Amino acid sequence: MPSDLMGAADELADQFLRVTKRYLPHIAHLCLISTFLEDGIRMWLQWNEQRDYINMSWNCGMFMATLFVIFNMCGQIVGCVLVLTRKYVSYACFGLFGIVFMQTVVYNILWDVKFLMRNLALGGGLLLLLAESRSDGKSMFAGVPTVGGNSPRQYMQLGGRILLILMFMTLIRFNTDPFTIFQDIFGLALMLLVTVGFKTKLAALTLFLWLLIINLVQNAFWQIPSYRPLHDFLKYDFFQTLSVMGGLLLVVALGPGGVSMDEHKKKW
């Protein structure tokens, strides 16, 4: 009976993928880079605050602080536009990698574990985007030998899945509420399945739908007045969760890759 139920769920996931395969990658891209897009727009709307913060933190002068804000804002918005329009995706990913690194240094994120995990996980999402944009035949790793039939692209997929779990870990809420405990354990179990590549598409799709419901219910920042600190707190969690959902959708669209338990089962 459990095997029949699992088989039916697998078939349902495959059917969903067949129906949505033309649109799924685009939705995944939008969700995945939503954190960058929101941050770029926030830079524009909070221009003076961002500039003054950089100037006070680094004592670099208003000119250098302004240059940083411009570079940060334009880099994120332009990178997002390139990803969404599927133009120069590899260059856009490398540019966004640079933004992540720069923010990690400038905002002293190295010493904040939660924000550091978030930035590392954003790198995981970018790795998945980079892997998707590189076909095996036209890879930047052309000429690099493969081991056991696994291309560097597939190792990039594995790295993206591993880093994606770091971002999910930042969503875990450590309290004694029974539903929250269930939510954390259920989500973590599915995320571990995605990471090791076992029942990958089904686990990723199930976790995506679960996070979609939780995000709309628990992080509804639009219901909170913008002047309240809770508004910014919920907004941060909303887009963070949305990026995790984008990574999961991309895993559904790409498949687990060669470095996964699903792929090895086919060889047994």
Image (cartoon, rainbow, N blue to C red):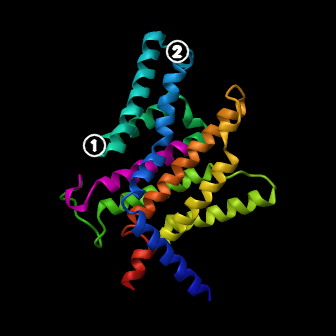
Q: Residue at the spot x=39%, y=39% of the render?
A: 80
Work out which residue is located at the far left of the displayed protein and give it: 143
The image position of residue 12, as x and y in percent, is: 50, 74
The quadrant in which residue 176 appears is bottom right
Mark 1: amino acid: Lys
- How far apart are the alpha carbons under marks 2 and 1? 34 Å
> Taking 43 as reference, is 15 above or below it?
below
Quadrant, the C terminus? bottom left
Asked which secondary structure carries label 2, the reply is: helix
* Circles 2, 1 touching at the beta carbon (< 8 Å): no
Residue position marked by numbered label 1 in the rendering: 87
Image: magenta residue range: 118-140
Asked which secondary structure carries label 1, the reply is: loop
The image position of residue 125, as x and y in percent, is: 45, 50
> Taking 141 as reference, is 15 above or below it?
below
The quadrant in which residue 184 appears is bottom right
Q: Earlier in the sequence, mark 2 or mark 1?
A: 2
Q: Residues within 10 Å of mark 1 (few under 14, many from 20)?
A: few
Q: Residue at the spot x=57%, y=18% of the render?
A: 49
Mark 2: amino acid: Asn
Residue position marked by numbered label 2 in the rendering: 55
